[in-house]
Image (cartoon, rainbow, N blue to C red):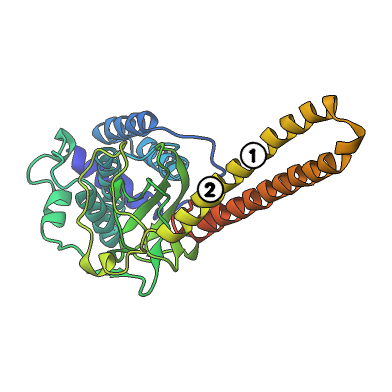
Amino acid sequence: MIRVLLALVMIALPSISFAQQETCSGYTNIELNEANAQSTSAFSKADLGRAQRSLIRAQNQLRCLDEPIHPDSFASFARLRGLLAFFDQDESLATQWGIAARQASPDLAWPDLFDEGHPFRDLLDETEDPPLSGIQGGFLNIPSKGAFLINGQMTWQPMTSIEVPHLIQIVDKRGDVVSSMWQDGAAFSDTVLTDEPPSAFKAPRWYQGDVPEVPSELLAQKKPFPTGKVVTSSSLLILSGTLYALSASQARSLKDAQSSASLGSMDDLAQSRGTVNLLAVGSGLTGLAAVGTSVTLLIDNPTVGVHFRF
């Protein structure tokens, strides 16, 4: 009886599309789980208007998450979003959200709302995942020791299923989201891509999901560690420190000599002052060179994160 009521009510509702994005104000996985619970309750009571408002509000806020989205939470949301489209008689959109849920958490159990034989479940069982597509010649801009997430799952390449909604999150090594957006299929934005391959392939400590295998073609293009620049920068820093220490030592000796110097030793004192100045200048120049080399390392690093939201 509830299904009949749901169908009748949803026929009268307008087709729902992606709502216009609003300014981010912060969002958490806890709030997403609460929205999922509210929507589930609304569906069970045939309150489609309440379910619609809750889900669309959550959809707008998901890109404002300040933490990595949990795949199970995303999958639960995507199922409910698909159910909303299903009762709106938009079978295409319903399957797209259902596939997104299945890919995010394939082993997630179905709640009582989707009992065995539910037409939405049957629709998904009969639908295969769409083919993969991606960007040729481009690489993901993955932060150093961070991760690039699609619907909560790590990925190494700009490649994903077409015609499926994806929540993109770029997360730094601390687990803070530095950039996020909704993406339709494999239409990766230029702002999340780079021309340089990743320098390392390791999951951050905060990531608890399955780490995908690194494709062999991506490993073959891995940018080598800049050993030469690191050695050069370190050597310049050591040399700068050594010259500074010698300059300081000579300056102390010069001060002691000045306090006891005779008129006949003034030439020697002048020569000592020149030596101190020369050592100080050499220390400064080598220090600047070391800083310049270090800055070059940072600029050339392809894993510098994108610190803004869309």
Residue 37 placement: quadrant: top left
**Residue 20 visible somewhere in the drawing:** no
What's the residue at 44%, 69% (across, down)?
195
Q: Position of residue 84 (x, y in %)?
A: 30, 47
Label 2 sits on residue: 307
In primary-sequence order, the first of circles 2 and 1 is 1
Amino acid identity at mark 2: His
Label 1 sits on residue: 246
Q: Position of residue 138 (x, y in %)?
A: 39, 70
Question: Residue at the bottom extreme?
Answer: 136
For label 1, the SS is helix
How crowded pointer 1 is (Cα within 10 Å; few <14, some 14-19, many 20+) is rated as some
How crowded pointer 2 is (Cα within 10 Å; few <14, some 14-19, many 20+) is rated as few
Question: Residue at the right extreme?
Answer: 263
What's the residue at 32%, 42% (across, down)?
204
What's the residue at 22%, 48% (across, down)?
211
Q: Position of residue 307 (x, y in %)?
A: 53, 48
Task: Specify whether 119 is left or right of 40.
Answer: left
Residue 186 placement: quadrant: bottom left
What's the residue at 28%, 30% (across, down)?
41
For label 2, the SS is loop
Q: Are discs 2 and 1 less than 8 Å apart at CB?
A: no
Q: Position of residue 29 (x, y in %)?
A: 36, 33
Residue 124 placement: quadrant: bottom left
Front residue of 13/262: it is 262
Front residue of 211/44: it is 211
Amino acid identity at mark 1: Leu
- Position of 225 relative to 74 (above/below): below
Question: Residue at the front extreme?
Answer: 264
Front residue of 133/270: it is 270
Front residue of 263/109: it is 263
